[in-house]
Image (cartoon, grey):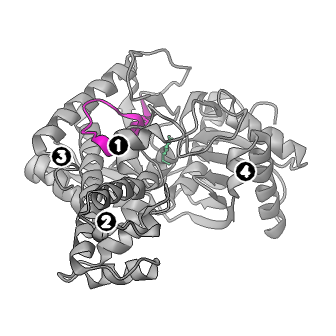
């Protein structure tokens, strides 16, 4: 299995070259697996100030925040509440989803006794085609979401309509952004070296700062010399080292043919890849004496959190892994089985970390091939923060690819940045409305 999931340095280099090629093609409006979506916002100055609401829709965990931006180098102050969307809300009709979001906002306002006019920045963690900072259409659902009637619609308008239906008249969406952009903006508010954002969680994606002169495809009016570009890098599919498990996983997914890199790297899929490898080894009689434990027998039953648990045990005996298997209801496992299982898991997560590092390396070296400058990449997501050794393996891969200069790419952990970032973007939108004489969220 180690060989099945191995990716050589040479292969990573070829992949990086292909990635930069796809970046250029996407910016030029040519067919590309990287969508290269302009976000109509540049890095903040750090002087943005005021009170804003933010809605952070990342997964089934939704956050509503009230953010005070001081604008003078001090840390922003955030108050937040978390809500959980039940599974039926993300797979039923879109009106059910947006109705629930509006009610969460209503509850937040009531509980905090907030009233008056509150501009809201909306983080929407899916591919968005924007023509301005104020709104954008959902291109396609990812990460298993399927709510109907939302693809092709302006999600900021859908939320504004749902707020109106709930008679929440003081709140209006003034800006819309992807979670990678939110993460970059949150970090960049206090860190001027931050020029990219990355999510390594249930899904994965990268955004970065680009000169607008490099964007040759038609874009809406923006008046900026730099913009953040949401690459939708999870959809990257050129020269990826896919194996038989990747092909099988894709076929049985909710979006076959899409998000190829995401399906090799992100938390939604790592457990399933490992499970499929276990099933194969067991079928060949090489694991668990050919008798598959229940936990591996159902699709998606073996989640990525379980992989983290397994990798937490790095003892030679793998006794911890045997205990976990026992806790998860498997028959007592032999030490050899526990070790082989851990090897499978390490192979799957190791490949993910290497691919994630290579795509970040490719992103940064498009405009700085010799890594002359320092680049700080704001990174958020459960895989990055919680998976044992994931960050270290990414850093090791960056050194392998760029030698000592790999250290110029700093992976800066940014927890829950996309909510704060949405507020920073709302502030930028408010600023440019003042200076450009245009009201954000027309008609409010
Ligand atoms: C979505 C991206 C998002 C990423 C991380 C992907 O599935 O397409 O828009 O940034 O997940 O949440």
User: Viewed as shown, does residue 221 lie left or right of 350?
Assistant: right
Label 3 with label 4: CB-CB less than 8 Å: no
Instruction: Work out whether 286 lies above or below 423.
Output: below
- Which residue was labeled with disc 2? 290
Closer to us: mark 1 or mark 3? 1
How far apart are the alpha carbons under marks 4 and 1?
A: 28 Å
Nearest to the observer: residue 437 or residue 80: 80
Nearest to the observer: residue 302 or residue 209: 302
Instruction: Work out whether 159 lies above or below 411.
Output: above
User: What label does residue 7 carry, if any?
Assistant: 3
How far apart are the alpha carbons under marks 2 and 1?
A: 23 Å
The answer to whether mark 1 is within 8 Å of ligand 1 is no
Q: Is residue 417 visible?
A: yes
Closer to us: mark 3 or mark 2? 2
- Which residue was labeled with disc 4? 89
* Point 21% across, 55% down: residue: 1
- Which residue was labeled with disc 1? 246
Number of other residues with Cα within 10 Å of mark 3, as a class: few under 14, some 14 to 19, many 20 or more: some
Where is residue 122? Give x, y as percent: 64, 46
Number of other residues with Cα within 10 Å of mark 2, as a class: few under 14, some 14 to 19, many 20 or more: some
Closer to us: mark 2 or mark 1? 2
Residue 214 in magenta stretch = no
How far apart are the alpha carbons under marks 3 and 4?
A: 39 Å
* Point 76% across, 45% down: residue: 98
Query: Which residues lie in the magenta part?
Result: 226-246
Under circle 2, the secondary element is: helix
């Amino acid at each position: 299995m180690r060989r099945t999931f191995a990716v050589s340095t040479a292969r990573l280099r070829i992949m990086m070259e292909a990635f930069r090629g796809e970046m250029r093609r996407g910016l030029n409006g040519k067919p590309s697996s990287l969508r290269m979506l302009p976000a109509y916002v540049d890095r903040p100055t750090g002087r943005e100030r005021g009170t804003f609401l933010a809605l952070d829709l990342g997964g089934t965990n939704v956050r509503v925040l009230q953010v005070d931006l001081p604008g003078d180098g001090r840390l922003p102050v955030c108050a937040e509440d978390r809500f959980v969307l039940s599974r039926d809300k993300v797979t039923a009709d879109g009106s059910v989803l947006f109705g629930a979001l509006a009610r969460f906002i209503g509850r937040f306002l009531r509980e905090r006794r907030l009233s008056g006019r509150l501009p809201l920045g909306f983080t929407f963690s899916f591919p968005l085609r924007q023509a301005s900072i104020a709104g954008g259409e959902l291109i396609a659902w990812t990460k298993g979401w399927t709510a109907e009637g939302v693809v092709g619609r302006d999600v900021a308008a859908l939320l504004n309509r749902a707020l109106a239906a709930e008679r929440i008249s003081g709140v209006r969406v003034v800006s819309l952004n992807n979670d990678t952009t939110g993460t970059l903006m949150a970090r960049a508010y206090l860190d001027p070296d931050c020029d990219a954002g990355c999510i390594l969680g249930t899904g994965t994606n990268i955004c970065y700062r680009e000169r607008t002169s490099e964007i040759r495809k038609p874009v809406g009016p923006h008046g900026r010399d730099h913009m953040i570009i949401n690459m939708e890098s999870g959809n990257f599919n050129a020269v990826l080292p896919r194996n038989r498990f990747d092909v099988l996983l894709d076929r049985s997914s909710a979006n076959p043919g899409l998000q190829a890199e995401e399906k090799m790297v992100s938390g939604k899929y790592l457990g399933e890849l490992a499970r499929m490898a276990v099933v194969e080894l067991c079928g060949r009689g090489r694991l668990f004496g050919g008798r598959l434990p229940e936990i591996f027998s159902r699709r998606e039953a073996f989640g990525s959190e379980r992989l983290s648990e397994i990798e937490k045990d790095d003892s030679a005996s793998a006794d911890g892994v045997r205990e976990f298997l026992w806790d998860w209801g498997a028959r007592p496992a032999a030490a050899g089985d526990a070790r082989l299982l851990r090897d499978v898991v390490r192979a799957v997560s190791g490949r993910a970390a290497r691919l994630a590092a290579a795509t970040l390396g490719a992103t940064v070296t498009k405009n700085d091939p010799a890594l002359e400058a320092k680049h700080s990449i704001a990174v958020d997501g459960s895989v990055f923060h919680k998976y044992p050794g994931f960050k270290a393996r990414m850093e090791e891969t960056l050194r392998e690819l760029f030698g000592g200069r790999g250290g110029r790419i700093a992976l800066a952990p940014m927890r829950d940045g996309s909510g704060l970032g949405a507020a920073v973007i709302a502030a930028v939108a408010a600023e440019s409305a003042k200076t450009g004489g245009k009201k954000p969220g027309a008609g409010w």
